[in-house]
Amino acid sequence: MTADTAPEPSSSGNGADAIIHAFHRHGIDTIFGYPGGCIMPLYDALIGSGIRHILCRHEQGAALAADGYARASGRLGVCVATSGPGATNLITGIANAYMDSIPMLVLTGQVPRGLIGTDAFQETDILGMTLGIVKHSYLVQDANRLPAILDEAIELATTGRPGPVLIDLPKDVLLSPVDLTLTQPVHSGRNQKAMPAISPEQMERARQMLAQAKRPVLYSGGGVSLAGAEGALRRFAEISGIPQVVTLKGIGNPGRGNPLNLGMLGMHGSKAANRAVQESDLLVCVGARFDDRATGKIDTFAPDARILQLDVDASEIGKLRAVDLGLLGDLSELLGALAQPLDIKPWRDWCLTTKAQDGYPSPELHPAFHTRITGPAFIERLAEMAGPEAIVACDVGQHQMWVAQYYEFDHPRKHLSSGGLGTMGFGLPAALGAQLARPDQPVLNISGDGSFMMNVQELATLKRYGLPVKIIILDNQCLGMVRQQQELFYRNRYSEIDLSDNPDFLQLAAAFGIPGRSIKSPDQIEGAIRDCLDFDGPYLLHVQIEAADNVWPIVAPGASNDQMLESSPYRTTQQTQGATQ
């Protein structure tokens, strides 16, 4: 049964019915979850409802799948779990959504109201546990308030700066009779705070800042996509001619093949991006939050630049870096009003020359390119063969940075990456959520051998629902990013990074009924990628790379972005030989 054939709504039912009715009212047709005792009334109401429930194999997988669904589609992601361990297993996924401002509705079962506070079976204070990682939360005490709470929660999650909203549902509330017509929001206007109007004087000052700049840089982040302002940003950049840099979540904002896109800035940013920012005299920050991974040492970040910051969230204006002017409002409208041609040709020429000289090094220049597979070489070829339609869900680690450096995207919603929280295990469930949101587009999960093992159980979900996600594991038999930092900043004192006893990933996938292939030499890359992309169904491509490979450049934690390392002062002779054999 689909949402189109769902039963006609009635005016009465119980709390669980109220949730189903809210789903239909708001066009929610897909949710992710795992059943249990206190949430069971909702699962009973799902029968015949027309709502597609995706049974993930772990509640964390359900939360991250809802996250991936929301990132890829721009719609609300919904996850459901029971009380106690079901709810606590959602916490990492909730925090991940909160850090990256992803719209998510989280529904958790709770023990009956009369048992709350008695240490009842599977009782946890999920409301208290998640206070710091949700946009808002509710513990429903009156069943008749549930329809209005649901409407308000969905509005809160999806408007303004998006984020997760949690509703904790006592079992007896789910079973209590409800008047389903009571949908007036319980706190009307909670999320309707009007933004202060921008004065003509502020807009004129912003235009003057742009006109006076000789070395401006356009610095954009994930807020652009959340605001649906990609087109406005590109028009502003084209009219003004300002060179661009992006954050990890802003990758894709400039579009594919944009010559004035200098790449990602920050810890693993391109030399061209970091150099341009450090030399700039005006930083136009759009939907970015001056994250420490982007700025490095904040006191030395863009030291000579004035700051013009555009955002929808007042709390971000000047939070980490004092701004010369902050404009709060709709990003598309602001960018449209500020677009103007700028006389900065010498600066553009300098940036283009710097990009040509100091961009990410070509993987073909890697000393071992012809004898073994390197992460950059593989990612660059994968990007060429997968084409612009593919959605990529990354896990966290070195492979994530290689994707950020070498895979060019034409839209930020095609690059799904855990930015703020850095959640290992994000990629596989996010990919399955994205595939459900975008069934007609190819979806790739690019993972490392460490991250892949964290939510490997979701292979069963891929197989059950026949989702044709392509899983690519860059396997260096270690926790690569930790190993790299221990090499560079702990003088080769390696601690607990060895993963050489991982299972055979092909046999593991085969146990779930998913075929695959393993490769280890460059001459296998193209054929293996073609086999992977062309297979009709889920597929696992295992790519063996060297443990000694590092991500370059890198800015040491706490250092300035102009202090980029491109080699290791502690690389041993044995490591060097291993990297070039």
Image (spheres, rainbow, N blue to C red):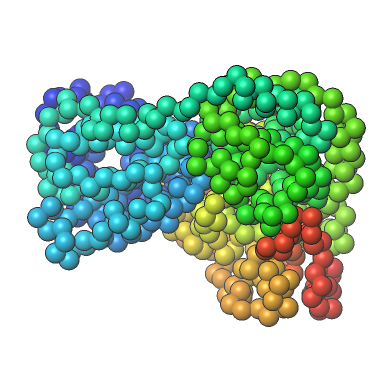
Residue visible at 14% across and 41% down?
A: 142
Above or below for 157 versus 130: above
Classify residue 466 by image quadrant: top left
State the image coordinates of residue 369 (x, y, percent, origin top left).
Answer: 84, 58
Residue visible at 81% across and 36% down?
A: 215
Classify residue 383 by image quadrant: top right
Quadrant that contains the N terminus = top left
Quadrant that contains the C terminus = bottom right
Residue visible at 85% across and 42% down?
A: 355
How many numbered marks appear?
Answer: 0
Res 104 visible = yes
State the image coordinates of residue 37 (x, y, percent, origin top left).
Answer: 19, 55
State the image coordinates of residue 507 (x, y, percent, origin top left).
Answer: 54, 63
Q: In terms of depth relative to the viewer, which is nearer, 153 or 200?
A: 200
Residue visible at 60% across and 34% down?
A: 326
Q: In terms of depth relative to the viewer, which is nearer, 251 or 310?
A: 310
From the viewer's perspective, tell me whether residue 433 is left or right of residue 27: right
Farthest-out residue, front: 201
State the image coordinates of residue 150 (x, y, percent, origin top left).
Answer: 27, 35
Q: In terms of depth relative to the viewer, which is nearer, 513 or 210?
A: 210
Res 517 visible = no
Above or below for 471 versus 335: below
From the viewer's perspective, tell me whether residue 177 is left or right of residue 166: left
From the viewer's perspective, tell me whether residue 363 is left or right of residue 319: right
